[in-house]
């Protein structure tokens, strides 16, 4: 292996990382729902018991309860959960205490120790508590012997599945499964790259090989703006109802549905976008990647519209995804300040500073003109790797523009447009393969179809909630 000799390996680094796979639980029976709900309440009781014990110890200056103490405190007292789930809840509480201690030691004293009772908590199971059956997985709940209760879900867990938890998210249950993933041991190369995160362009990558990649963030922004409008309308309608009345609950469910859908769509696009960045970095032999942390921009207060935009721009998630995907590809990813990188001329003999306007960066001193986000990423090299590593803005022919994925209906229904990657549909992909829909109905894959036909509650249409797939169905009919 001659290549291995040239390319450094990550000696001593971890060989695996964990990730979370999410399975939405759409089709559970009323009985299963009741069992899970009781389990969540019981987990809330476990949490509250731990919280009380810890709170009393804090107030009376007694030694704080350890995990073992919490275990003894809760043992045998929670009939709606299996023993391992009770222990897992105690362990999670113990973890919260440990991270709070660490945070407070680091100077973040605004973070408080747990002080509030919880009615609900996620139900947690360690890996060994789960039974793999022929039809899926069996999740134990409370009861002993022949009175033991289970929830059987038609989910085949991944081979390297670890601990699981069932959580309530935007009006539906979700199963979150920890999975172990391998980390690349070989570094793609000795190259360097810088990433500038943004709202209109989710990420701009410049490598020292002279290439640039711009991943569009417009799709994500569109989805969020649509969500803001729809939620605003529903809020107005809700304000005219009595709180917790039947009509109010209908609106609330509609809000949950919209929020859940937007969350899944945005997450999907973010994963796809960050993968594009890491793939390009790998292709260009980048071993070290620097991401500018836009913390400063976000703190800046400038009007309510700008503030809403800023608060909805999840650059922290982008940084996390890039770090995780980078680690898996063998790339060292670090973050740091990006001060004045986007307001300085990238021309090494000019370095004029000016305020940016519009999508192009036009220097008022030397007259140079470049793409705005690439300027930011280019200037970051000096900050990240020292002045010796200065690069120039990539030439036009070396810049790639990509969308992270299709948004809405524009590209979805186009004939012959095979999907490049699987969308974030959770179980739906396994229950109704898209090819079947295509062959049976005779039109291009339209994932919305399968979903819409399966009763989404009478409320959605009558309440004037915009249903993204409604118009497509009408067009096809
Ligand atoms: Zn200039």
Image (cartoon, rainbow, N blue to C red):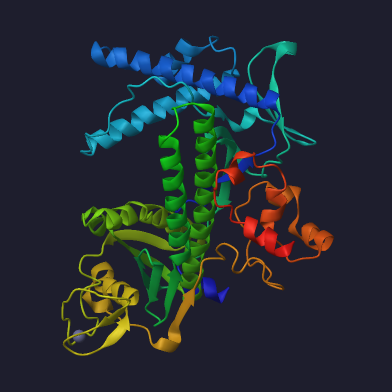
Q: Residue furthest front?
A: 240
Q: Nearer the viewer, residue 196 or 473?
A: 473
Which quadrant holds the C terminus? Answer: bottom right
* Residue ID at (60%, 53%): 424
**Tally of numbered discs:** 0
* Residue ID at (30%, 12%): 56
Give the side of residue 162 with respect to residue 213, left or right: right
Residue 254 in view, yes or no: yes
Query: Which image quadrant for residue 237?
Result: top left
Query: Which image quadrant for residue 394?
Result: bottom left
Q: Nearer the viewer, residue 52 or 361?
A: 361
- Is 20 situated above or below 280? above
Residue 240, percent from left and from top: 42, 35
Q: Residue furthest right?
A: 440
Give the side of residue 78 with respect to residue 61, left or right: right
Residue 185 in view, yes or no: no
Residue 38, percent from left and from top: 58, 19
Residue 86, percent from left and from top: 53, 20
Which quadrant holds the N terminus? Answer: bottom right
């Amino acid at each position: 292996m001659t290549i291995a000799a040239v390319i450094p390996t990550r000696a001593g680094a971890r060989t695996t990382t964990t990730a979370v796979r999410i399975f939405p639980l759409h089709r559970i029976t009323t009985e299963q729902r009741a069992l899970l709900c009781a389990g969540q309440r019981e987990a809330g009781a476990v949490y509250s018991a731990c919280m009380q014990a810890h709170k009393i110890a804090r107030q009376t200056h007694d030694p704080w309860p350890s995990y073992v103490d919490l275990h003894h405190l809760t043992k045998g007292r929670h009939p709606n959960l299996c023993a391992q789930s009770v222990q897992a809840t105690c362990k999670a509480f113990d973890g919260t205490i440990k991270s709070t201690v660490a945070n407070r030691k680091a100077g973040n004293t605004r973070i408080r120790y747990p002080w509030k009772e919880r009615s609900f908590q996620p139900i947690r199971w360690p890996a060994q508590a789960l039974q793999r059956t022929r039809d899926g997985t069996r999740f134990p709940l409370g009861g002993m012997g022949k009175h033991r209760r289970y929830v059987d879900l038609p989910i085949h867990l991944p081979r390297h599945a670890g601990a699981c938890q069932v959580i309530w998210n935007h009006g539906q249950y979700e199963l979150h499964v920890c999975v172990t993933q391998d980390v690349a041991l070989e570094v793609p190369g000795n190259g360097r790259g810088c990433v500038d995160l943004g709202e209109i362009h989710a990420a701009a990558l410049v490598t020292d090989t002279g290439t640039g990649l711009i991943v569009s963030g417009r799709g994500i922004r569109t989805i969020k703006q649509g969500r803001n409008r729809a939620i605003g309308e529903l809020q107005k309608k809700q304000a005219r109802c009595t709180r917790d009345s039947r009509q109010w609950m209908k609106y609330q469910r509609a809000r949950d549905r919209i929020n859940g859908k937007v969350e899944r769509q945005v997450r999907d696009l973010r994963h796809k976008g960050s993968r594009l960045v890491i793939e390009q970095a790998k292709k260009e032999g980048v071993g070290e990647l620097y991401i500018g942390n836009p913390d400063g921009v976000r703190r800046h207060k400038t009007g309510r519209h700008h503030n809403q935009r800023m608060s909805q721009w999840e650059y922290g998630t982008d940084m996390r995804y890039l770090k995780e995907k980078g680690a898996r590809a063998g790339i060292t990813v670090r973050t740091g300040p990006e001060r004045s990188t986007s307001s300085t001329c990238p021309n090494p003999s000019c370095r004029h500073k000016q305020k940016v306007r519009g999508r192009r960066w036009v220097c008022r001193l030397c007259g140079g003109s470049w793409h705005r986000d690439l300027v930011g990423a280019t200037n970051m090299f000096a900050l990240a790797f020292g002045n010796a590593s200065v690069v120039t803005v990539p030439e036009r022919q070396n810049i790639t523009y990509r969308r992270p994925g299709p948004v809405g209906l524009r590209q979805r229904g186009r004939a012959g447009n095979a999907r490049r990657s699987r969308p974030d549909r959770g179980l739906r992909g396994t229950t109704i393969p898209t090819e079947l829909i295509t062959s049976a109905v005779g039109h291009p894959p339209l994932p919305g179809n399968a979903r819409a036909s399966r009763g989404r509650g009478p409320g959605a249409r009558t309440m004037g909630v915009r249903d993204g797939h409604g118009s497509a169905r009408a067009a096809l009919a």
